[in-house]
Amino acid sequence: MNKQLGSIYANLYVKGSHRAKRLPKVARPMRPRVIAWAGPTAFMRNRFYKMDKWYKARIAKPELVPELHVIQPEKYSRSFEERVHVLSPKVEKIDIGFKSRQAANLQFERNEAELERMSRKNQLLINLKSLDLTDRAIFDHYNIMADLFRPGVTFNITQNLDVQFGDASSVFYGNCLAPSSVVNAPDVKIESFGSDAFNTLVMLNLDGNAFSEEAGKQLVHWVVANIPDSGEVNLGDVVVPYLQPLPYKGTGFHRVAFVNFRHREKIDLTSIALKGSGLDDRVFDMNKFFKTNEEKLTPSALKFFQTQWDESCRKTAADKALTLPSYHYEFNEPWKPEQREFPLKPQPFNLYLDMYRKPESIRAEMAKRRLTMQLNNISVEKPKYPDINYVENKKKLPHWQHEKLIRENSGIGPGAALWRESSQ
């Protein structure tokens, strides 16, 4: 006997009732079959055509992406305490200068409400020359004293030193000056104490030594010895003639320091006089110089500024027959996908085609255009406005060409080679 499966009420049907005899049919949408589609290139022959399994399957051969360099932060990053310990290790300080001068307790009245109002409206001006910036923290931040002598060496600023290039370019504590503004020797005023002592002023480029592999050496730009206590630098003996700081192209900012030494008697510094006119003859070892004369010299003042390459460096080097090295960073060639007639990612065609051009050909094209501009007496100064005729060009030029014009006039991308580099 066959056992009935299911409910006994499933076959019951009462005439006149609303119970359906069968389940209703549900209209389901048509589900298309999935096929592999690789675009129109999968069905046409081209120069990359090859009878292989990928062509037979009508599927484009997948592109193998190289394994990218992945950095795991937990293996390379340090905590704040570890970074402070590595960057600023505890080194025993060696004071090679004079005893610190006690600043007078100046008491004066000031209107707090007026100062607050001027500060809120950006009208409060601070005279940097009147500030007492003798805090050694700024020298530690820029690693000035460590690169002048050696790590751990320090001294107190006990003498005022005023260095002025022209009317608007003064040297403070790390301010930026363009090489074009420091072409000539500065006007230097050294504080006088009314004694019979002498001063020796040394001007150094802490980052300019590209001619010696020994660490701790600088490039000397100016040395004036045996300056009387009156502070008149022109009364001293010029041991090394002045040379404009010449930071090398591609090396960023260079630190140029002025160090003043005090001594009781005149000293002979002919041993550090230049033996030639090249930059390699100006390589200087400040630590060795001080070690040799530490019984006579005591540092008392220090100021420095920062500068980076501009066109005046090239002109000065040409006038003095000097050869300046030039540096540039060699980036790894960026990975780019295989060039296709129909790229998967839509993008402007000119940028897509330039991506597969050799960088040398692009640089040669820009150099040729710049030379053509100079031959036709067209200024190579970067325009003040990216497109002075924006409304007209927006109407008559294609979008990609108008965007290319704006990028070139803005100095973005390869178009930056068309314009003269401005000093900062």
Image (cartoon, rainbow, N blue to C red):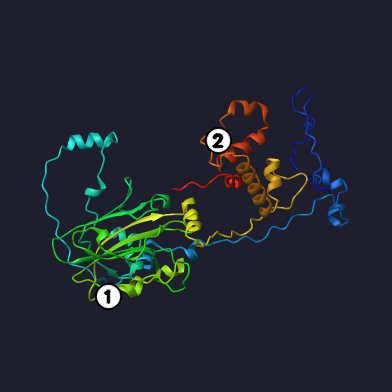
Which numbered disc, 1 or 2, marks the residue that appears first in the sequence?
Answer: 1
Q: Position of residue 161 (x, y in %)?
A: 25, 57
Q: Nearer the viewer, mark 1 or mark 2?
A: 1
Q: CA distance from mark 1 to mark 2?
A: 57 Å
Query: Residue shown at 45%/58% (left/top)?
Result: 247
The quadrant where residue 119 appears: top left
Q: Residue 80: x percent and y percent?
A: 38, 61
Q: What's the residue type where badge 1 is placed? A: Asn
| Lateral position of residue 284 relative to residue 310, left or right | left
Residue under the image location 70 percent in, 52 percent down: 337
Answer with the quarter of the image where residue 411 lies.
top right
As drawn, the label of residue 293 is 1
Residue at the top extreme, as displayed: 16
Q: Position of residue 389 (x, y in %)?
A: 58, 28
Residue picked out by circle 2: 386
Q: Secondary structure at mark 2?
A: loop
- x, y percentage for residue 111? 15, 37
Label 1 crowd bin: few (<14), some (14–19), many (20+), radius 10 Å: few
- Front residue of 150/370: it is 370
Q: Is residue 356 left or right of residue 249?
A: right
Secondary structure under tag 1 reads loop
What amino acid type is highlighted by mark number 2? Answer: Pro
Instruction: Pick the residue in front: 167 or 291.
Output: 167
Decide: few, some or many residues near mark 2? Use Cα within 10 Å; few <14, some 14-19, many ≥20.
Answer: some
* Residue 307 badge: none
